[in-house]
Image (tube, helix red, strand yellow):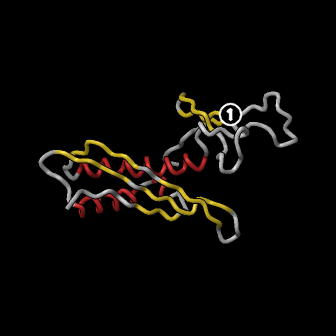
């Protein structure tokens, strides 16, 4: 293996009775010493047994793809001589049934909005090419079965 990545997930039952299914799905995710609250999705397990203020696995998957795509996009834009001032992405993951009827993250739509400055500004074609290349190189994207749609905000013509 070329690289290895680590995550620590920890959960404790506390005083809840486990056998009745009414235990908290709240837990902690720890990466590189930083901890974040995690939970099942409130769309899957209703509050108060899940936490609406915590990251759920489906959100994390969408965020991981959006982050990976952005990092490649920024690097390719820099190498092409463009100056990116800001980048945001309101990415959306959608669940659907697979061929066996099991739910999975079937589609992730990235909605990246990159803002540029400087003497060399990218055309709509340049931006589309940068996104295409980022999609082609993104490690997380290579790991997913979901349809990935990239719908960038383009500069006015």
Q: Residue furthest bottom?
A: 99
Residue at image location 38% in from the left, 61% down from the top: 151
122 vs 97: above or below: above
- Relative placement, left or right, of 38 versus 3 is right
**Image position, residue 133 (x, y; %):** 34, 60
- In this image, 99 relative to 70: left or right? right
Q: Residue at x 55, y 34 (%)?
A: 31
Q: Position of residue 83 (x, y in %)?
A: 21, 45
Q: Residue at x 29, y 52 (%)?
A: 76
Crowding at dot 1, Cα within 10 Å, few <14 / some 14-19 / many 20+, comes out as: few
Q: Position of residue 22 (x, y in %)?
A: 81, 40
Q: Position of residue 20 (x, y in %)?
A: 87, 42
Q: Nearer the viewer, residue 113 or 82?
A: 113
Quadrant of image for the C terminus = bottom left
- Could you tell whether 14 is left or right of 147 in the image? right
Q: What residue does disc 1 label?
A: 10
Q: Quick one: which residue is furthest to the front in this view?
A: 47
The residue that appears at 36% across and 56% down in the rendered structure is: 134
- The tally of labels here is 1
Residue lying furthest left in this view? 119
Check disc 1 and report its element: helix, strand or loop. strand
């Amino acid at each position: 293996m070329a690289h290895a990545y680590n995550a620590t997930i920890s959960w404790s039952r506390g005083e809840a009775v486990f056998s009745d299914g009414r235990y908290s799905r709240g837990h902690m995710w720890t990466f590189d010493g930083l901890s974040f609250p995690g939970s099942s999705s409130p769309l899957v397990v209703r509050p108060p047994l899940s936490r609406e203020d915590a990251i759920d696995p489906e959100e994390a998957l969408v965020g991981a793809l959006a982050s990976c795509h952005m990092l490649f996009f920024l690097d390719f834009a820099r190498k092409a001589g463009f100056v990116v001032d800001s980048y945001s992405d309101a990415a959306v993951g959608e669940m659907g049934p697979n061929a066996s009827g099991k739910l999975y993250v079937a589609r992730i739509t990235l909605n990246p909005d990159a803002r540029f400055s400087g003497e060399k500004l990218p055309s709509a074609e340049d931006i589309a090419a940068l996104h295409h290349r980022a999609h082609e190189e993104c490690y997380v994207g290579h790991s997913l079965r979901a349809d990935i749609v990239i719908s960038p905000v383009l500069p006015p013509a």
